[in-house]
Image (cartoon, helix red, strand yellow):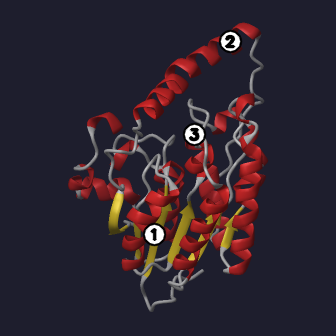
Amino acid sequence: MDGSSRGSQKRFVALGDSFTEGVGDWNPMLPNGVRGWADRVAEKLAKSEKGWEYANLAVRSKRLRQIVADQLGPALAMEPTLVTLYAGGNDILDVGTDMDALLTQYEELVRALADTGAMLVLFTGYDVKVNPLLEPLKRRNRQYNEHVRALAREFDAVLVDYWCFDEYADRRMWDSDRLHMSKAGHKFLARQVLDQLGYTQAFKPRQWEPPLRRGPREWIAAQRTWLNDWVVPLIGRKIRGVTLGDHLLPRWPEPVRVPRKGGLRRYVQEHPDALANTPDWAR
């Protein structure tokens, strides 16, 4: 990919939810307190070729309808040359979601992005092994992924088939909430995206020793911590009708020129106002 579909402009715009915002790859020195695979991809693009700009409109917890309402218009106005989209995962987890309606809206969003002429990158969803109670969601995941794959073929989009990455069977690829990738998980995904785009990169796979087996006591303690720290608060938010993204703005709402040296962390050092909309709790 040379990013030359509109002359010398090279502009990467990322849309979606927590997956693309970067949740799990925590960094208090960056907007919304996270980094994520999309930032890592943007930095590699900037190192490979001069002139790359980057915007990330993704906000955690957003449903597909909110992504369409809040992110599609700004993304189209930016005239991107590269667009990434992952959306609908939160809807799949919601009780009562009409999958046919969801997939129809997703297809309309993909079509609108493909019509820009930008290179479009789509993602399947991963089968997160959180709890046996969520196993019935597998059918929804399969339905969603089959549709994504079909649309990738129809619109000649790049497909990052996240569902197929066996590396994510290792719990160390996941943050403590078991739903979002850890820093290692985001690094691995950045490599996969760059590979699909045809960029060679210096990212090296994480070499781990085999995970230690946990005894019954350790397993019970881990389950208790997870329930107290993540599940109970999540249920409380659902009861109250609030989400973690309600008071957050996109991390990079306007295209920024990514420094070839120092990346986005250097950009923030030179433009401290980039952190102005990040609340203290998110840092």
Image point (41%, 81%), residue name: 79
Q: As drawn, which residue projects farthest toward the bottom? A: 7
Residue type highlighted by circle 3: Ser
Distance of label 1 from label 2 (alpha carbons): 42 Å
Secondary structure of residue under mark 3: loop
| Residue 19 on image: x %, y % | 54, 50
**Three-letter amino acid code of the residue under disc 2:** Ile
Whole-percent x, y for residue 109 in the image: 54, 71
Q: Residue at x 39, y 45 (%)?
A: 245
Disc 1 and disc 3 in contact, CB within 8 angstroms: no
Q: Nearer the viewer, residue 97 or 137?
A: 97
- Please give the label number shown on residue 182: 3
For this view, does 42 lie left or right of residue 265? right
Which mark is drawn over residue 248? none
Distance Cα–Cα, label 1 vs label 3: 22 Å
Quick one: label 2 or label 3, which is nearer the N terminus? 3
Q: Which residue is mark 1?
A: 13
Residue in the image at 33% along x and 56% along y: 266
The residue that mark 2 highlights is 220
Q: Residues within 10 Å of mark 1 (few under 14, many from 20)?
A: many
